[in-house]
Image (cartoon, helix red, strand yellow):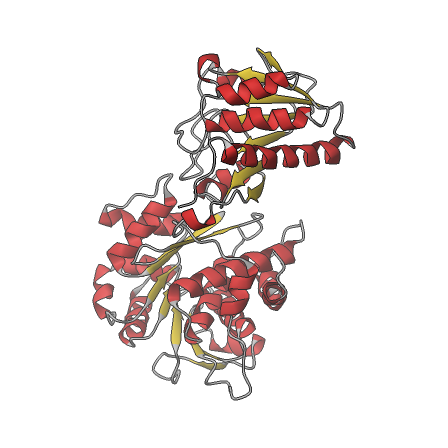
């Protein structure tokens, strides 16, 4: 283990904070020298980071004032350095500040801010740069249960933390910048995984010179009904757009599917569908006896299966359906919050603020991969691995969007991807397609579906 002199890592971290603060000042006001920054300083190391950052900003002729929430426990070396550099200690937030640096609490804190911090935060009118996390936001879940900072930018060190990806933290953190302070060898295995474009591009199936429509994976779709034929069209279309393999549809919406997707082999029943490598079952299927029998038939097939929407409700209301499943066949469940409650609450699993823990528990109890939809999509597998895909917007919250996601997952299962990674990569492309389809205006599931190829191209081009 390499040892560094005491205080070195804090000063490296603080320099990263100061650099980002200077950039924010320059972007907002056109300059750095002569600008005014207020530090909100707590008792922990985050307060020390803020004080040392203030010292570095003083070297660039920034007027820096520090509000000490607990003066007797302020970081002594950081406070001394700031004062030697000409920084001031004050009792309240400067109304004329150009920037506020939040160093009130760190990653070990829990719960909302209390007085006097909560009162100070209410006075903030300037942009905020948070050190590690916005104070008052839960570091493990991103939940907010009371007064908390909303940051424009958050600077963290070494790697992203759960608060940057989960819950309300996804919004409260603003733009997140990771500063490398040399912790790489000490970080160990991550608790959560967030895919980047290179990860998705490396996993996404691309045909080779010896591939044909069968070798790339044949996806079977069991979706739709007389009431919801659109679910069949959307789910099937997503599988068509996702890979260069083959898609077979089995169900009552065969005519509608053929009309929209002539390349799909569409039949009226699972028995007539032909051989597939994976199934998607549930969107728009209905929750009556006919849907139950079809889902049981699919589960008995012993193939990787994505179960969504009505399929999840059927599993929740007919627990005996699990007995039809080949125990070695992977299953991916894709619930939104209400569907999660239907299937999980009878097992004693409650979906609270800790969405990661809830998804992990359901995955372990059912032996399935669980993709829990939300602003941050959480993907857990029975081994405890968790992948998180944070959304950049909420445009995916539109009717039929989940059907598109299911079709993407099914196509990747058919191509042979590990189910956990298949669900994660599909979530990434789905979110990116929604972003491209919306372009800051309302969109629809059909447009999201049409944007899938562009989203895959974005991953292959390394575009975030």
The quarter of the image holding the C terminus is bottom right
Taking the image as shown, residue 283 lies to the left or right of residue 261, namely left
Query: Percent position (x, y) of residue 231?
Result: 48, 65
In this rendering, is residue 415 above or below 285? below
| Residue at the (35%, 56%) spot, across then down | 385
Q: Against 59, is 84 above or below?
A: above
Pick the residue in front: 423 or 38.
Answer: 38
- Return the x and y of residue 350 as percentages of the image width and height: 30, 43
Determine if residue 121 is in view: no
Quadrant in the rendering for residue 52: top right
Give residue 139's position: percent from left, percent from top: 43, 36
Report x, y in % for residue 263. 55, 82
User: Given the current orientation, which residue lies at the most extreme top position?
Assistant: 91
Q: Is residue 70 above or below residue 239?
A: above
Q: Where is residue 130, by image quadrant?
A: top right
Q: Looking at the image, which residue is at 74% across and 34% down?
A: 26
Residue 293 appears anywhere in the view = yes
Q: Nearer the viewer, residue 97 or 246?
A: 97
Front residue of 450 and 135:
135
* 227 relative to 242 in the view: left or right: left
Query: Height in image: 313 above or below 246?
Result: above
Nearer the observer, 147 or 77: 77
């Amino acid at each position: 283990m390499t040892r560094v002199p005491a205080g070195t890592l804090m000063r490296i971290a603080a320099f990263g904070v100061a650099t980002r603060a200077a950039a924010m000042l320059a972007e907002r006001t056109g300059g750095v020298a002569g600008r005014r920054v207020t530090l909100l300083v707590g008792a922990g190391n985050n307060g020390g980071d803020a004080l040392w950052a203030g010292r570095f900003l003083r070297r660039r002729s920034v007027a820096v004032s520090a509000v000490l929430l607990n003066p007797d426990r302020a970081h002594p070396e950081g406070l001394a350095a700031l004062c030697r550099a000409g920084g001031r200690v004050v009792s309240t937030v400067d109304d004329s500040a150009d920037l506020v640096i939040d160093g009130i609490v760190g990653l070990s804190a829990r719960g909302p801010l209390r007085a006097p911090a909560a009162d100070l935060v209410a006075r903030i009118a300037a942009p905020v740069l948070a050190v590690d996390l916005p104070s008052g936001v839960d570091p493990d879940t991103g939940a907010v249960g009371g007064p908390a900072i909303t940051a424009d930018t958050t600077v963290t060190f070494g790697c992203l933390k759960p608060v940057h990806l989960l819950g309300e933290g996804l919004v409260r953190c603003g733009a997140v910048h990771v500063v490398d302070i040399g912790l790489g060898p000490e970080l160990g295995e991550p608790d959560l995984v967030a895919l980047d474009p290179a990860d998705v591009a490396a996993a996404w199936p691309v045909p080779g010179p010896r591939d044909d429509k069968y070798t790339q994976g044949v996806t079977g779709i069991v979706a739709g009904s007389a009431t919801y034929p659109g679910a069949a069209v959307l789910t099937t279309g997503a599988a068509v757009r996702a890979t260069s393999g083959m898609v077979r549809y089995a169900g009552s919406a065969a005519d509608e599917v053929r009309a929209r997707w002539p390349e799909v082999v569409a039949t009226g029943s699972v028995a007539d569908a032909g051989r597939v490598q994976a199934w998607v079952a549930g969107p728009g299927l209905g929750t009556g006896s006919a849907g139950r029998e079809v889902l049981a038939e699919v589960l008995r097939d012993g193939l990787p299966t994505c179960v969504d929407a009505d399929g999840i409700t059927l599993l929740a209301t007919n627990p005996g359906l699990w007995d039809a499943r080949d125990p070695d066949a992977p299953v991916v469940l894709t619930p939104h919050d209400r569907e999660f409650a239907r299937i999980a609450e009878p097992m004693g699993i409650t979906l609270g603020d800790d969405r990661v823990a809830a998804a992990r528990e359901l995955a372990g109890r059912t032996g399935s991969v669980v993709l829990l939809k939300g602003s941050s999509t959480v993907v857990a597998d029975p081994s405890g691995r968790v992948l998180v895909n944070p959304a950049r917007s909420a445009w995916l919250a539109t009717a039929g969007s989940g059907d598109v996601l299911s079709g993407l997952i099914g196509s990747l299962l058919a191509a042979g991807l590990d189910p956990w990674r298949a669900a994660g990569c599909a979530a990434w492309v789905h979110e990116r397609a929604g972003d491209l389809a919306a372009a800051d205006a309302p969109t629809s599931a059909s447009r999201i579906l049409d944007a899938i190829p562009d989203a895959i191209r974005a991953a292959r081009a390394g575009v975030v």
